[in-house]
Image (cartoon, rainbow, N blue to C red):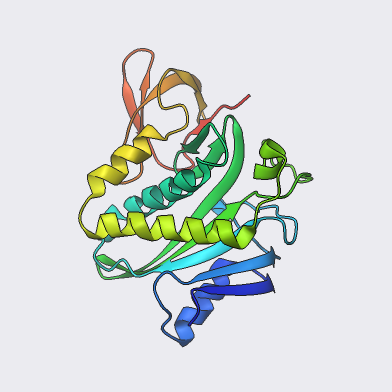
């Protein structure tokens, strides 16, 4: 099977891969890309706006059976790091907003949605959805801070070429994890974090406060150190960055 399956339209590339995997075994690293997703999703069920044919909306399949379910956040780290490394030569000031949004300055250029299918204590299959704003220049949804590569550089980008570069970088970092070099991936992820140093505003359902990122735990939780030196951990959706 080809490493890239190109669709004109689908409900969602993650859903397409899910159905395909139930029918047949496909090569690890296979990517499904769609010109248009009718029901593209982001983290937590949020919708993802994408003008047809302008951006990367894709999903890639991995079989990380060697990774235990309790350590699955390393996949999120290696994938978001791979997107950052691909974008670095094209645009400056890229970062990873915990857990795996891709930012340029204070604006969101990409998002990642990972679905793991478990077999006992290990991950049997992993479907990685990536949305990346590339050639779109007008955003009409209520998303607060979108930006695209073309808005930054003024230049059109070849979507398939960029996709191949992202795929290559993912497989490179995936091989590092396969070899047991998790520490290298984790350290690079930490170095690429949005607001990785200094105190910034955060909010939960009950409070607003200033804190700095102390660390990201292997579970994926974020540990924030507040002004009074107290360190508190939060899971995804339990705390939000306050962005101007």
Q: How many marks?
A: 0
**Residue 226 falls in image quadrant:** top left
Compared to residue 201, the image places residue 101 above or below, namely below
Q: The C terminus is located in which quarter?
A: top right
For the point 46% across and 60% down, which residue is it? 167
For the point 39% across and 73% down, which residue is it? 28
Depth order, front residue of 131/71: 131
The image shows residue 71 at horizontal and vertical percentages of: 27, 53
Compared to residue 84, the image places residue 34 above or below, namely below
The image shows residue 135 at horizontal and vertical percentages of: 71, 50
**Residue 185 falls in image quadrant:** top left
Left or right, residue 49 beside residue 230: right
For the point 54% across and 67% down, which residue is it? 14
The image shows residue 157 at horizontal and vertical percentages of: 66, 52
Left or right, residue 131 beside residue 96: right
Compared to residue 86, the image places residue 168 above or below, namely below
Left or right, residue 52 beside residue 131: right
């Amino acid at each position: 099977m080809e490493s890239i399956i190109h669709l004109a339209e689908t409900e969602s590339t993650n859903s397409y891969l899910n159905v395909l995997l139930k029918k047949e075994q496909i090569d690890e690293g296979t990517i499904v890309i769609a010109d248009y997703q009718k029901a593209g999703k982001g983290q937590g069920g949020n919708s993802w706006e994408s003008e047809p044919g302008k951006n990367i909306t894709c999903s890639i399949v991995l079989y990380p059976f060697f990774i235990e379910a309790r350590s699955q956040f390393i996949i999120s780290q290696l994938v978001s790091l791979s997107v950052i490394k691909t974008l670095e030569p094209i645009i400056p000031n890229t970062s990873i907003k915990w857990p795996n949004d891709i930012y340029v300055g204070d604006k969101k250029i990409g998002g990642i949605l990972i679905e793991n299918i478990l077999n006992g204590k290990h991950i049997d299959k992993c479907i990685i959805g990536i949305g990346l704003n590339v050639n779109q220049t007008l955003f009409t949804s209520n998303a607060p801070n979108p930006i695209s590569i073309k808005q930054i550089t003024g230049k059109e980008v070849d979507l398939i070429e960029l996709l191949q570069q992202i795929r290559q970088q993912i497989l490179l970092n995936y091989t590092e994890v396969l070899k047991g070099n998790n520490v290298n991936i984790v350290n690079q992820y930490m170095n690429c974090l949005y607001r990785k140093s200094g105190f910034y505003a955060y909010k939960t359902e009950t409070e607003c406060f200033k804190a700095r990122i102390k660390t990201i735990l292997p579970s994926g939780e974020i540990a924030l150190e507040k002004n009074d030196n107290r360190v508190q951990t939060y899971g995804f959706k339990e705390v939000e960055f306050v962005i101007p």
